[in-house]
Amino acid sequence: MRECYQPSPGCYVYSADVDTETAQTDHRYSPPGRHTPSLEQTRPWVWARACTIASPADGHPWIGKWLWFVPLSQLDDAWANVRAAVETDRLGFAAKAGTLSNHRGFTDDTRRPICIYTPDWRDVPEVERTLTRLRALGVKDTLRYKRDTDTENGRYGPGAASYICPAGTTTLVITHRTRAALDHYQQARAQARHTADKRRTLKPC
């Protein structure tokens, strides 16, 4: 059943242009068993990494990810699709999928998350680019974007999302909390530039 979403008060809505570059993958692609979420018995996650896109250092404070909650019956095919796109540098720098042995308190145990990472949640154009690539891959569900630091700090549930994309669209809904953080970031950058320019002006010849 298609999920409908109405932006809540305090959300700012932006529409991303659909990426015209093709991002199709072969749906017959079959990953090795060690990469298949339904066959993994020992690890809670299976991972994919981009071939040439540099990954931020572990613990980088700005990393975030798009979250796609996939029915178990579609998990392996969905992961094969995402993994192929990541490993050919057509999506984020990394992705992971929850395995059947992953029972980390999900409210719906008939689904598992697939996470697609971007290096900086403050980089709205890159967040949008990854979103449009996901839509081009055929992902039609509602998607939510979350900062890694929120996960590490135990922030879960609907209020944890930084961005939301309603089902079947490329509309980026920026939550009030994220808009305030982005405004603060832009103001800090402007102040830093102003200070640097002032120092250059006052520097003796």
Image: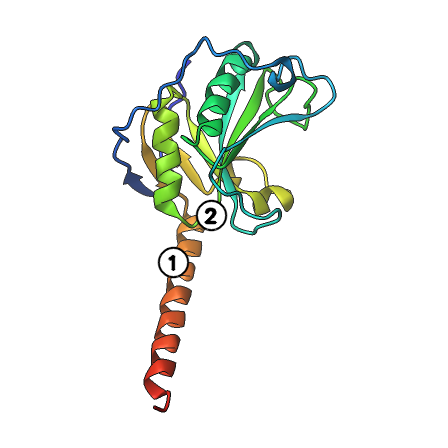
Type of the residue with mark 2: Asp
Where in the figure is residue 4, as x and y percent of width and height?
37, 24
Q: Which label belongs to residue 93?
A: none
Front residue of 10 and 63: 63
Q: Residue at x 39, y 65 (%)?
A: 189
Query: Of the residues under marks 2 and 1, which one precedes in the sequence?
Result: 2
Q: Position of residue 26 (x, y in %)?
A: 41, 13
Residue 155 showing in the rendered view: yes
In this figure, which residue is indicated by the disc labeled 2? 120
**Of 149 and 126, which appears nearest the observer?**
126
- Amino acid found under the numbered disc labelled 1: Asp
Badge 2 element: loop
Residue 5 appears in the picture as rendered: no
Badge 1: few (under 14), some or many (20 or more) residues near its Cα, within 10 Å?
A: few
Q: Residue at x 34, y 31 (%)?
A: 132
From what the image shows, is residue 100 above or below residue 155?
above
Q: Is residue 115 left or right of residue 183?
A: right
Q: Residues within 10 Å of mark 2 (few under 14, many from 20)?
A: some
Give the residue drawn at x 42%, y 40%. 163
Residue 155 image offset from top left, x and y in percent: 60, 42
Q: Quadrant of residue 129?
A: top left
